Image (cartoon, rainbow, N blue to C red):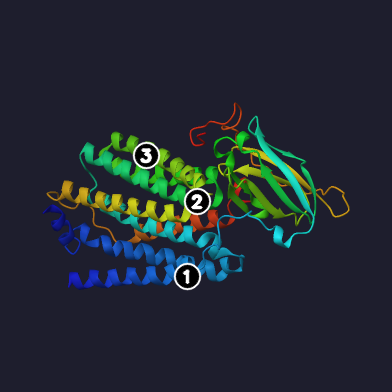
Amino acid sequence: MKVRKNTLYTIGIVLILFSFGFLFLSQGESNLVTGNSILENAGNVQIVKMYVENGKYIITPSEFKRGDIVRIEADMSKMPGCSKSIVISAFNIRKTLTNTNNVIEFKAEKAGTFNIVCSMNMYKGVFTILEYDGSKSNFVEQASSGGHSCGGSGGGCGGCGG
Amino acid sequence: MSFKEFIKELNGSRVEGELIKTVFYSLLVSFALFAVLYFFKFRYISDFIPKYGFFLFFAILSFGLVVPTIRQVRAYKRMNCMSGMMVGMTIGMMAGFLSGYFVGATNGMFIGGVFGMTVGVTLGIWTGSCCGVMGFLEGIMAGFMGGWMGAMTAVMLINDNLKLASLLIFLVCAVILISLNYMIFLETKENEREMEEDHFITLVISFILTSVTSWIVVFGPRSLLFT
């Protein structure tokens, strides 16, 4: 009797897992890595240089125009540790830069001041996208209050490596 | 030989014979609650399943593994110091790590760490106290460490194979928790069960953990990485 009961419970567990597993796992995010080249469909291209200094992303120029394609080229010699792993959540960008693939591209579809951070939220920077007419938007993406444990002296917290 | 006895006891009359039933009840309550929440609220959130479904699914499975162990520990009430420390440490660490990891993967390190630590410390203390202050200490330490480590691991994997790592981590934690079930069986097989209880606690813990986790994952504050 006991065997039969547990067999039924086991079948129940398997059924629950299959039915909900199908619902939950059938629709995964399409692709984790974003920010790869989109220049094929491009309009105006704004080329930007980026490196890390004192734990912050320095982006020059740091103002782009709305509607442009932004092409961020990283100076990999000045990108320590986890600063290579970039997240720009406002534009759904997630990409780990390498020496052979050091470019992030995205279309500046909205105006405002946005954050660029490393994937551990340690290195941080900001850039601004101006309106079509060149005026500055009032929108400022909220910055997190997290610390700069990687950056201050050139990037070396426990998790960041070098 | 002993492991065969343990497998045999999964169909026996001791508390180990109720473990599979407890997993079933825990999953049933959690997924039923989730189905209700999804029908009335979550399905109106754009990209809900692609964004959060994977992590919520594994979070619910994790609770389904932790809850039976709590039942097993409660059934024997008292253990010797070494076993009790192991119980507090393992449950605190696994509960903290898994809940911290899955919340950290959707909300960031701070929220994941705080949530994981809260769950891990609470369950670690509760179960570790079966052997007094040493189990209590192990529980609180393991919950604290596990919660923050889980959230940190998830955030460090954001631009890497986060989902694959989630699966591997879940599998390893499942093996650890089942091994703990086996260890408790070995340590207590000469003892009489001290507490008979229905499945009310199982249902309550599963309900609370699933509802709080779902609320935090969907509506809770997020770090800069996830805004």
Q: Is residue B221 visible?
A: no
**Secondary structure beneath disc 1?**
helix
Left or right position of B115 against B78: right
Q: Nearer the viewer, mark 2 or mark 1?
A: 1
Task: Tell me: residue A24, above or below residue A59.
Answer: below
The residue located at (50%, 44%) in the rendering is B156
Q: Residue furthest top?
A: A153
Tell me which label, 3 or 2, sits earlier in the chain.
2
Image mark for residue B103: 2
In the structure shown, which secondary structural element does the residue marked by tag 3 occupy? Answer: helix
Chain on which label 1 sits:
A
Give coordinates of residue A33: x percent, y percent. 57, 55
Dot 1 amino acid type: Leu
| Element carrying mark 2 | helix
Q: Chain of mark 3?
A: B
Q: State the residue position of label 1.
A: A23
Q: Are marks 1 and 3 on the same chain?
A: no
Quick check: B23 above or below B160?
A: below
Which amino acid type corresponds to the residue marked 3 in the rendered image? Ala
Q: Amino acid at mark 2?
A: Val
Residue B142 shows which numbered tag?
3
Quadrant in which the N terminus of chain A is drawn:
bottom left
**Would you say B122 lies left or right of B156 here?**
left
Residue at point 27%, 41% (across, down): B86
Image point 62% across, 34% down: which residue? A78
Packing grade of label 3 (10 A; few <14, some 14-19, many >=20) is: many
Q: Are marks 3 and 2 on the same chain?
A: yes
Residue sitting at x 81%, y 48%: A138
- The answer to whether marks 2 and 1 mark residues whose Cβ atoms lie closer than 8 Å is no
State the separation of the CA atoms marked 2 and 1.
20 Å
